Image: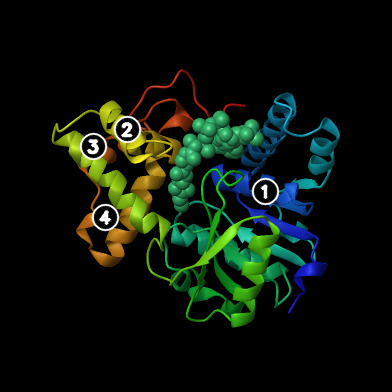
Amino acid sequence: MMELEKIQNTAIIGCGVMGFGIAVVILNKGYNVVVVEKDKPSLERGLEYIKKFYEGTVKRGKITKEKADENLFRLKGTTDFKDIPENSIVIEAVYEDIAVKQDVISKVEEVVEEDTPIFTNTSSIPVIEISAKMRFPERFLGFHFFNPPPVMKLIEIIPSLKTDERYIKFAIDFAKKLDKDPVVSKDTPAFIGNALLIPFILEAVSMYEKGISTPEDIDKACKLGLGQPMGPFELADFMGLDIVLQIADNVFERTRDPRFSAPAKLRELVSAGFLGRKVGRGFYDYQKPKPFGVEL
Ligand code: CAA
């Protein structure tokens, strides 16, 4: 198995909201990052946002221009899995759909060494299910960042029934190298964070549906009364309503747990394409879309 200290390269599959943030976290720690996207337009969009994000942090005086340029120098984008360098750690951060995840992971397995650690940023699908078609599932586990990855300190580490102990230790050490604080969770749908958060958001939407209060006042209650940085509607818009619904449906499908049964209002907004901040409208109206949830 590869030694963590000798690894310089990471590959991130998918450069959407999470892949983008994960790339920033890893670049900031001095690694080379290759971002793999499905097509040229998605790749260009992802890379552009990473560049713009660094421009913003330079403008706000958070890092120097030299440091930002040095980070960007270590970033490469590709649509070809063969460009994943030897001795990489691979993190899959594509759409929360098991078929899509299995497809990209099989493409990764075709090009990397047998002992390359392959991690998934799944937020709700059991890791063992994603790994069902893998040739070497013992090197696979959940490595779940929270949004926005550059800010949130937590990483959930989720070994499957087949994960080798050495990879769990490797993942914990890697999370700490990224300056994150890892927790280990059993491989159950939605793990720890989302198993608590999603029923909370769904309950807030039900309260709104029942006319108990408005999104504005429910958010205010949670911020001013419960000390949360964002209320459930702001947070759902920030995460993406499609993501919230997808997590709820993924868990409900597997458990039939009524706490994960999505209220009609949420499904209606998603069907209307009102997916939250990234498109400029969700529970709230925004002036303009913020594609990665960030004001750049
Ligand atoms: N990406 C990267 N960085 C971001 C960011 C984003 N989307 N949004 C904010 N930041 C950074 C800003 O650049 C800023 O950094 P600097 O201090 O270096 O300039 C810092 O965060 C603070 O930002 P702001 O001052 O603009 O805003 P804020 O103080 O109101 O904090 C927040 C913003 C961190 C998002 C805060 O509102 C918060 O903590 N919200 C709750 C987030 C949360 O609960 N996340 C979990 C979601 S659930 C999940 O992720 C699970 C899943 O599987 C989907």
Quarter of the view holding residue 291? top right
> Which residue is disc 3 drawn over?
265
Residue 6's spot in the image, x, y percent?
Answer: 82, 68
**SS for dot 3:** helix
Residue 64's spot in the image, x, y percent?
Answer: 81, 32
Marks 2 and 3 sit apart, C-alpha to C-alpha, by 17 Å
Q: Between disc 3 and disc 1, whose residue precedes? A: 1
Are dots 4 and 2 in contact, CB under 8 Å? Answer: no
State the residue at coordinates (65%, 65%). 108
At label 4, which amino acid type do we have?
A: Phe
For this rendering, which residue is in front, 239 or 275?
Answer: 239
Between disc 4 and disc 2, the foreground one is 2
Q: Is residue 102 above or below residue 267?
A: below
Between disc 3 and disc 1, the foreground one is 1
Q: Between disc 2 and disc 3, whose residue precedes? A: 2
- Can you name the residue that lies furthest to the top here? 287
- The numbered mark at residue 219 is 2
Q: Which quadrant is the C terminus positioned in?
A: top right
Between disc 3 and disc 4, the foreground one is 4
Q: Between disc 4 and disc 2, whose residue precedes? A: 2
For this rendering, which residue is in front, 2 or 12?
Answer: 2
Are dots 3 and 4 in contact, CB under 8 Å? Answer: no
Residue 59's spot in the image, x, y percent?
Answer: 73, 24
Between disc 2 and disc 3, the foreground one is 2
Query: In the visual, does 269 lie left or right of 65?
Result: left
Q: Is residue 208 above or below residue 284?
A: below
> Which residue is disc 4 drawn over?
260
